[in-house]
Amino acid sequence: MIGDEEEILCESEVTCVGQIICGIVADSQEHAKMAASAVKITYEDLEPVVLTLEDAIQHKSFYGHRKLEKGNIDAAFEGVDQQLEGQIHIGGQEHFYMETQSVLVIPKGEDGEIEMVCSTQHPAFSQRVVAESLGVPSNRVTVRVKRIGGAFGGKVLKTSIIAAITAVAAHKTGRAVRCVLERGEDMLITGGRHPFLGRYKVGYMTDGRIIAVEVTCYCNGGNTLDHTLSVLEEVLLNLDSGYHLPHLRLTGFACRTNLPSNTAFRAFGQPQAIVITESWITDVATKCGLSAEKVREMNLYRGEKSCTPYKQTFDSRNLLRCWDECLKTASYRNRKIAIEEFNKLNRWKKRGISVVPLKKSMGFSVPFLNQAGALIHVYQDGSVLLTHGGTEMGQGLHTKIIQIASHELKIPMSSIHLNETSTGTVPNTSPTAASVSTDLNGMAVKAACQTLLQRLEPFMHDNPKGTWNDWVKEAFMKKVSLSATGYFKGEDLFMDWEKGEGTVGSYMTFGVACSEVEIDCLTGDHKNIRTDIVMDAGSSLNPAVDIGQIEGAFAQGLGLFTMEELKYSPKGVLYTRGPAQYKVPAVCDIPEQLNVSLLSGSRNPKAIHSSKGLGEPAVLAGCSVFYAIKDAIAAARKETGLTGTFTLNSPSTPDRVRMACVDQFTKMVPVSEPESIPWAILV
């Protein structure tokens, strides 16, 4: 079992399609598949089968719930000019990492020792699960990670299941065993981003000021708890997005369903939160006859002492700076006028534009995860071997860590080598997640470097004209240790749900994204014309790496909100098990103009060298494309006299866009019969 919920191998009751029942060990992949096909299992149907969020609500199938209130919501609703209600569904997302779940386990042949080469974001957790599965202490299990071919949260907990099964096989056979999931298997088994349903009621003034908001969220957790409650909490904590909302009542339910358990995914609930929030922002703008940009701007957080719904204060001035700079660099107002002219001249092609503020709290809200360790060896020739607790998965973590060590030790980066992450060198590591791995591990590396410099300081003082190599040799000859550990204890973040208050992030990362699209009203297809993103990166450690991360995160958010759609059968079987059925963004989906800039003059005293985490916040920028599409649809609906609010669920796939552009052709589509069984269901 993993935690109190997830079975590594199903023992008696199968609760979803994709649950692992047994493992086959063979001398080749072909033989393993032949053996697996020979296994015959008899099932009895479970009742009731809960697949969709509506099913879970009907059957009250919940893991738990959370609630957060601010102000006097009931009195606030009585004092507003107008009220509106609505809802939006946000679909799930597949991690679609390039390298699927992969592990190689090598039994060492004595004392129960096991060596694992594993594609995991959380080596310490995989180590613990494997040790418990084999009945040996953790010191017998060494997990090594050279680099990962993508992860995005899908290799925090899920990898440990595959690792445990593979380790048992290696232990039983006494031979090295490798397990690499095929793409279809990976997508079927491992789950992904949580689908959400958000229902809202908003009280506002006729000038666009938002006074009261009540939101109830439901998330599809799947058949085990995994990270579901934590994701639900993050959604509730971030439903304010970049806006000051005087009165709030936020309620969330974590739903237990008969689907593969959903898990951590890049930005961890905040993409779902921002789409729900921007849905009612656009509804308020439509009802007031104002542009969405005007409603957003008047409700933005302002000032040095802004306060979140959970009573954490923060400085929001950089959010306003990002807003103003993005509007300016994107030429928003001039393009808005040009788009209106284009729409007047074109009946079946419409353009839309949207500008959206981004705010993300940085840090693990689970206090003990905010820690990190590092180990540095200096050899007699002056070369440095460095390792730390974070894993490299293409995000440039190792590059930044080497930069930090180079800066602290005042030696070239070429003199420093970082070979791999291993539980045998740095124990008890936190997962590489939440965009804080540079913050945590960077500070641990800095501490180790400072320890080494303190030991070398007497030799540097006695030989001020010497070189690094000279000081190292002298220290070695004087029997001074040239190996040092570093440790960093991060901030004690917390959230008290009973009191409705907490400090859930060490600092905030801000940004603003502006996107323009063109839709084809007859096919529902859309073209991404231009996106401008301004991000507050603090004092960037490596602007090239950071801008690359922003671009990649934006593309992943673009996929989430506009094209990546998981389809399930009415019996809970995943249809979309590969790129032939599941569409991720390609080169042609990236905006023709993609402009990314980092806010100048920003400093962050709470992170290494005044930097900020960026890997996750920019995922939120993808929703600017979604709401640009909705803006274009509104222009199309205006042609047929429809000027009110309307629902557009995420992702905004061509069929949804086409049907939202109501015209004489959409009215010809026959309505589905209530008793008919759909081909695919909305989970």
Image (cartoon, helix red, strand yellow):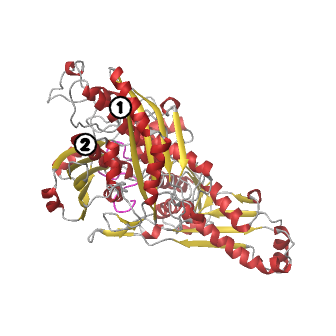
Residue 142 coordinates in the image, percent (x, y): 59, 62
Count of numbered badges drawn on the protein: 2
x and y, in percent, of residue 43 in the image: 27, 42
Q: Mark 1, mark 2: which one is toward the viewer?
A: 2
**Does 193 sit left or right of 290 as displayed?**
right
What residue is rendered at 79% in x and 81% in y? 458
**Looking at this view, is 36 or 680 the one in front?**
680
Please state, as top left, top right, bottom left or bottom right, where the C terminus lies in the image: top left
Q: Secondary structure at mark 2?
A: helix
Give me the residue at 35% from left, 44% from top.
Answer: 293
Q: Is residue 247 left or right of residue 28?
A: left
Q: Which residues are magenta?
A: 1-21
Q: Residue extending furthest left?
A: 78
Residue 234 tag number: none
Pointer 1 residue: 653
Q: Name the quadrant of the N terminus.
A: bottom left
Q: Distance from label 1 to label 2 (Cα)?
A: 20 Å
Q: Is residue 330 visible?
A: yes
Picture quadrant where residue 374 is located? bottom right
Residue ID for mark 2 = 283
Q: Residues within 10 Å of mark 2 (few under 14, many from 20)?
A: many
Q: Pinpoint residue 165: horizontal percent, then vertical percent.
A: 47, 52
Magenta-colored stretch includes residue 17: yes
User: Which SS class for mark 1?
Assistant: loop
437 is higher (above) or lower (below) than 663: below
616 or 263: nearer the eye? 616
Crowd tier of the residue under label 1, counting other residues whose Cα lies within 10 Å: few below 14, some 14–19, many 20 or above: some
In-front residue for pair 210/525: 210
